[in-house]
Amino acid sequence: MNKMNVEGITTILFDLDGVIIDSNPAIIDAWSRTAKEYGVDITQEQIDQFIIGASHKYTLEKIFPGFSEEDKKTIHSLVDRREEQADCHLIAGVSAFLSALHCCPVNIGMVTSSWPEKIHHVLRQHRLDYFQCIISRHDVVKGKPDPQPYLLAMEKMQATPASTLVFEDSDNGIRAALAAGTHCLAINNDHYSNIHCISSFRQLSVARDEVIYRFARGGCGVKLRPTR
């Protein structure tokens, strides 16, 4: 999708990690602490290559290649538990932006590679009661970068790709959203010249004029504030 005014958005989908919450520190801590308990010291290079934005299967294969499947299962369970219990800060401006969208004639959903226990912990912690549909890693056979999670969300929310706007931060997430045919806005990821990128939700507002994504109903849309 190129950078132009878009008419007719009915559905907005948010990723969780890196879009709603700044969870990278918690993810790194969970993997590092658990690995150390198994005698493995994770390097910064491994964090960058094999943990951030990667599936748990990929991380386990790359960092624990000599471990048994039973050990890998236990490691994964410990990491999940630590992530679930971690307190993560919200991405700047996302709460106010969600509140503004909640007053608009659009449907709001979440599509994440996280799991229900972690999702509900975050939503309770930050009192984010805005999502009409949540797709987690338990709902799909293929995760991001496969488009299946976004295709399932649109099916459940009765939306078309042309009427759906996605907020994503990782390369895998953006690839999934674009492969599903949706419009996508990147958070802290400027690898894609054909989509808009913002550093925080403070750069966005709901307005009637000069919008970059217009809602199908209500006469308003998403406006991009100029950076200073």
Image: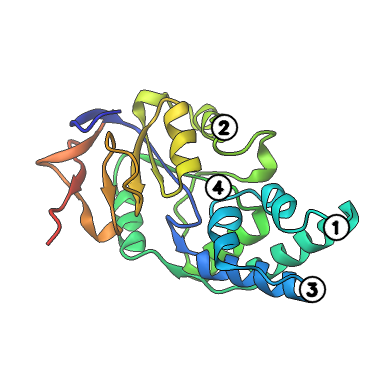
Circle 3: element type: loop
Residue 83 position, x and y percent, is 64, 67
- Label 2 – label 1 distance at C-alpha: 28 Å
Sequence-first disc among 2 and 1: 1
- Label 3 – label 1 distance at C-alpha: 11 Å
Q: Which mark is residue 112?
A: 4
The residue depicted at 82 percent of the width and 57 percent of the height is 72
Instruction: Please state which amino acid type lies under the numbered disc 3.
Output: Gly
- Label 4 – label 3 distance at C-alpha: 31 Å
Sequence-first disc among 3 and 2: 3
- Label 3 – label 2 distance at C-alpha: 34 Å
Image mark count:
4
- Label 2 – label 4 distance at C-alpha: 12 Å
**Measured along the vertical axis of the image, is residue 186 above or below residue 157?**
below
Circle 3 residues within 10 Å: few <14, some 14–19, many ≥20: few
Which residue bears the numbered disc 1?
67
Q: Nearer the viewer, mark 3 or mark 2?
A: 3
The residue depicted at 56 percent of the width and 39 percent of the height is 144
